[in-house]
C-alpha cells in the first residue's frame, strides 16, 4: 500500500498546481534552477519585472518557483513582496539582485545605495519544510563610504545572532570622536518561523539583550 500511496499523492499534488505561462507585460530578469524539496528534481525560479514602470522606482518585481511535471511547468510558489523594484535606491544602475539555490534553500541577495554614501545589502534564506517555505536565515549590512560598516546576521534555526559594528575616521573629519567597535553574539529563541509569503523585509524586530537597541530584519 505504501508504494501506491506516494505516487498517488504526487499525482494529486500535480493536479492542484496551475500551469505556468508568462503574462504579456512581464520581462524576465533572471532564472536559476536547483532542488528545493530534496526530491532529486530541480525546480526553476524565474524573476520578472512586472506591470508599468513607476517614476523613481522602476518596475515592481515578482518571482515564481516552478515545478516541471510531465514536461509542463507548474506554479508551486509565487511572491511579489520580497524583491526591491528595479530602480529603487540612489544609484539604481548599481543595484544588484542574485537568486540562488544552495543546500536545498532559496537564497535571495539584494544591494542598493540608500544615498550617495550608504550601501545596504541583504541576504534572505528560505527552506522548504512542513509544506511551505520558511525564513531560516537573514543577513544585512549597512556601509558608509568611510565612517562605518554594520553587519546583522541571524540563523533562525539555531537562534544564533551576530551583530558587528566597525567605525573609522573619514578624511577631513578628524575632529569627530570615533565610536568604539562593537561585536556581539548571542542566542535568541524564536517560537515560530516566518513563512516566506508572510515575511516583510525590515518589519520584524526583537530586543538586543543588555541594550536599548533592537535587531531589525
Image: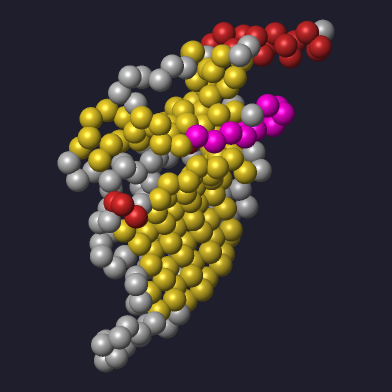
Residue under the image location 40 percent in, 20 percent down: 22
The vertical placement of 104 against 188, above or below, is above
The vertical placement of 122 against 179, above or below, is above
Residue under the image location 27 percent in, 28 percent down: 51
The answer to whether any part of residue 13 appears in the image is no
- 180 horizontally vs 49: left or right: right
Let me know if residue 34 is in the magenta part: yes
Residue under the image location 66 percent in, 14 percent down: 10
Let me know if residue 160 is in the magenta part: no
- Taking the view exactly as shown, the residue that stands out farthest to the bottom is 175
The colouring scheme, among rainbow, by chain, secondary structure or one colour, is secondary structure
Viewer-proximal residue among 92 and 213: 92
The vertical placement of 178 against 94, above or below, is below
Residue under the image location 40 percent in, 31 percent down: 28
- 174 horizontally vs 122: left or right: left
Q: Main secondary structure of the magenta part?
A: loop
Bounds of the magenta segment: 31-41
Residue 108 in the image, given as x and y percentages of width and height: 48, 44
The vertical placement of 23 against 42, above or below, is above
Residue 188 in the image, given as x and y percentages of width and height: 54, 57
Residue 190 in the image, given as x and y percentages of width and height: 54, 48
Amino acid at each position: 500500500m505504501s508504494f501506491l500511496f506516494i505516487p498517488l499523492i504526487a499525482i494529486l499534488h500535480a493536479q492542484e498546481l496551475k500551469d505556468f505561462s508568462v503574462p504579456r507585460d512581464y520581462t524576465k530578469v533572471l532564472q536559476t534552477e536547483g532542488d528545493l524539496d530534496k526530491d532529486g528534481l530541480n525546480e526553476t525560479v524565474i524573476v520578472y519585472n512586472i506591470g508599468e514602470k513607476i517614476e523613481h522606482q522602476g518596475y515592481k518585481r515578482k518571482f515564481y518557483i516552478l515545478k516541471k511535471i510531465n514536461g509542463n511547468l507548474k506554479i508551486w510558489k509565487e511572491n511579489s513582496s520580497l524583491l526591491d523594484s528595479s530602480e529603487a535606491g540612489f544609484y539604481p544602475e548599481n543595484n544588484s539582485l542574485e537568486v540562488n539555490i544552495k543546500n536545498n534553500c532559496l537564497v535571495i541577495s539584494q544591494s542598493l545605495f540608500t544615498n550617495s554614501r550608504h550601501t545596504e545589502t541583504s541576504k534572505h534564506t528560505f527552506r522548504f519544510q512542513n509544506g511551505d517555505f520558511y525564513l531560516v536565515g537573514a543577513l544585512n549590512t549597512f556601509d558608509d563610504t568611510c565612517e562605518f560598516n554594520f553587519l546583522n546576521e541571524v540563523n533562525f534555526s539555531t537562534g544564533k545572532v551576530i551583530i558587528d559594528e566597525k567605525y573609522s575616521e573619514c578624511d577631513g573629519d578628524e575632529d569627530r570622536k570615533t565610536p568604539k567597535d562593537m561585536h556581539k553574539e548571542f542566542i535568541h529563541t524564536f517560537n515560530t518561523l516566518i513563512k516566506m509569503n508572510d515575511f516583510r523585509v525590515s518589519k520584524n524586530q526583537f530586543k538586543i539583550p543588555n541594550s536599548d537597541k533592537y535587531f531589525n530584519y
